[in-house]
Image: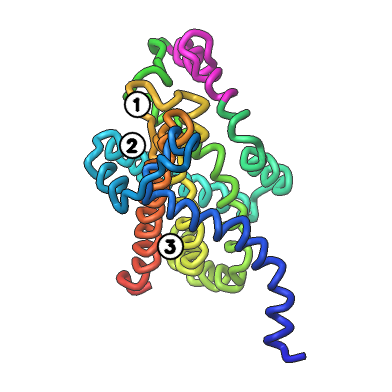
Amino acid sequence: MKPARAAWLFLAPALLVLGVFFLLPVLGALGLSFTDYDLYALADLHRLRFVALGNYWALLHRPAFWAALGHTFYFVAVGVPLSLAASLGAALLLASPLARCRAFFRTALFAPVVTTAVAMAVVWRYLFNTQYGWANHVLGAIGIHPVDWLGDPHWAMPTIILFAVWKNFGYNMIILLAGLQAIPRELYEAARLDGASAWRQFRHISLPLLGPTLLMVTILTVSGYFQLFAEPYVMTEGGPLESTTSVLYLMYEDGFKWWNLGTAAAEAFLLFLVMFAATLALLRWPRRSGA
């Protein structure tokens, strides 16, 4: 048997599963976005109408969609740099020769990643409760008035960002730690012999050699943060005053609360286009910068 034929034979089961459970649903959702599929069509398919790009056109003229997109961009623009900084900082500390109990700290910092987001969001909702939350208890101990963390439109999204960073930075930390450990130690030894400070070693050795790894974790983090849903769903239900309503949360409400499934499918594909454009921009950015 030829190697190419053997390879396709081994890939066939996985491709079949992907085709049935991924490709077909995606194509079905794309077709759904060109219809006015709603609760009435769900009861009687004869009520289903083809509206072409009508759903997309309506969304582009819908203030609630643009507000949700703005909240999502805010979450990504603030949360991604914070998450990457926390991940890189933790990875650098764990990779340091002075670090002790690395296995314990790797496990402790990675634990939130494998913990259910809904369960941790419920815990954080109590920690940031206005009346009996731990956060306000600490502020009161130093003479600061309590803050309505999840009830104030100015504080709700920053609180969710803080939770998301804490919940997710451990995943990137493990990847960056592996990247740091793959850098030859001889480079650092030569730099120290030349009198390079720790900052110069990081700037001229660690950071450049971590470039591909940083690009990968940035793309993964941006893609994940654009899919903001569980945090506002559990902690704020999109409030207060819809200040934490993301595109994915709006899609959930349109699709499963109001049963406008055609509109929800269109929102999903518009979000995909935004994520695709962001990924392309990130992939082309190192070329423009000459990296």
Mark 3 or 2: the one toward you = 2
In-image side of 102 versus 258 (left or right): right
Image disc number at residue 242:
1
Is disc 2 surrounded by few (<14), some (14 to 19) or many (20+) residues within 10 Å? many
Q: Report how far apart the C-alphas of labels 3 and 2 lie in the structure.
A: 38 Å
Q: Report how far apart the C-alphas of labels 2 and 1 lie in the structure.
A: 8 Å
Q: Is mark 2 on a helix, strand or loop?
A: helix
Label 2–label 1 contact, CB within 8 A:
yes
Q: Is residue 216 above or below residue 1?
A: above
Residue drawn at x 38%, y 40% is: 247
* Quadrant housing residue 181: bottom right
Looking at marks 3 and 2 on the same chain, the residue that comes earlier in the sequence is marked by 2
Q: Is 126 colored magenta in this rendering?
A: yes
What residue span does the magenta drawing correspond to? 122-142
Q: In this view, does 243 lie above or below 198?
A: above
Q: In this view, does 173 lie above or below 71?
A: below
Determine if residue 78 is in view: no
Residue lying furthest right in this view? 1
The location of residue 138, given as percent across then percent down, is: 50, 16
Residue drawn at x 43%, y 49% is: 32
Residue drawn at x 34%, y 62% is: 281
Query: Disc 3 marks which residue?
Result: 203
The location of residue 193, given as percent across then percent down, is: 53, 71
The location of residue 195, given as percent across then percent down, is: 48, 67
In-image side of 156 versus 115 (left or right): left
Residue drawn at x 50%, y 12% is: 137
Looking at marks 2 and 1 on the same chain, the residue that comes earlier in the sequence is marked by 2
Q: What residue type is labelled 1?
A: Glu
Residue lying furthest left in this view? 61
Query: Disc 2 marks which residue?
Result: 68
